Amino acid sequence: RGNRGTPKMTLGLPSIWRAKVERTFIAIKPDGVQRGLSGEILQRFERRGFKLVGLKLIKVSEELAEKHYAEHRERPFFKGLVEFITSSPVVAAVIEGKGVVATARAMIGPTNPLNAPLGTIRGDYGIDIGRNIIHGSDSPESAEREIALWFTPEELLDWQATIAGWIYE
Ligand code: ADP
């Protein structure tokens, strides 16, 4: 009844619709946005099978930048990092899916683009560590903190992707 052609169902729904799924925070930094890479980068995560649940273009305030990078407060590059991240718009996004925190980090690549393998975002597009194009949360705990810092609950959408059963078994 109306569900011909839909993939294997469990209790009528792909299991992913009933599971508590992981979320992570990513930010395309000013260099990535200025270079016109936003669409291409978001497409990589979408093609992998991850689902957007929050997305905005934002001019980052000094306060947000300092909170976001609080763990680096004492580092010599902190001031420059805050200046850079507030210098031009950033694309902030929350993506959702099984294992998304670690997988997004793997897709992003190591902090220094020169050490990043081809096929990773930093390895394909970057050269300098202070122009490494994208941020991704480094743990589920960081993801939770960063999502709450960058997005209000109303900005995060709970929605079901009808293709989920073709991505998850
Ligand atoms: P990642 O972004 O890979 O999680 P870190 O959390 O260590 O890396 O650092 C945060 C950001 O600070 C980096 O993405 C980079 O933009 C900047 N950064 C880190 N180390 C340096 C450095 N030695 N010089 C300049 N910028 C740096």
Image (cartoon, rainbow, N blue to C red):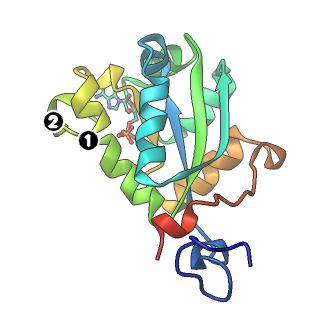
Choose top left, top right, bottom left or bottom right for residue 31: top left
The residue that mark 1 highlights is: 110
Where in the figure is residue 70, as x and y percent of width and height?
54, 38
Q: Which of 4 and 114 lies nearest the eye of the viewer?
A: 4
Specify the label residue 142 is tagged with.
Answer: none
Tag count in the figure?
Answer: 2
The answer to whether the beta carbon of the residue marked 2 is less than 8 Å from any atom of ligand 1 is no
Residue 74 visible, this angle? no
The residue that mark 2 highlights is: 115
State if disc 2 and disc 1 touch (CB < 8 Å): yes
Where in the figure is residue 17, as x and y percent of width and height?
65, 72
Rounded to the nearest angstrom, the CA distance separating label 1 from label 2 is: 6 Å
Amino acid bearing label 2 = Asn
Amino acid bearing label 1 = Pro
Q: Helix or strand or loop: what does disc 2 sit on?
A: helix
Q: In this view, does 48 lie to the left or right of 57?
A: left
Where in the figure is residue 14, as x and y percent of width and height?
60, 76
Relative height, residue 156 to residue 18 (above, below) = above
The answer to whether the beta carbon of the residue marked 1 is less than 8 Å from any atom of ligand 1 is yes
Residue drawn at point x = 47 percent, y = 11 percent? 34
Q: Quadrant of the N terminus?
A: bottom right
Residue drawn at point x = 75 percent, y = 57 percent? 158
Q: Which of 81 and 27 lies nearest the eye of the viewer?
A: 27
Q: Helix or strand or loop: what does disc 1 sit on?
A: loop
Residue drawn at point x = 49 percent, y = 66 percent? 166
Where in the figure is residue 126, as x and y percent of width and height?
26, 23
Residue drawn at point x = 46 percent, y = 55 percent? 49
Q: In this view, does 75 lie to the left or right of 154?
A: left
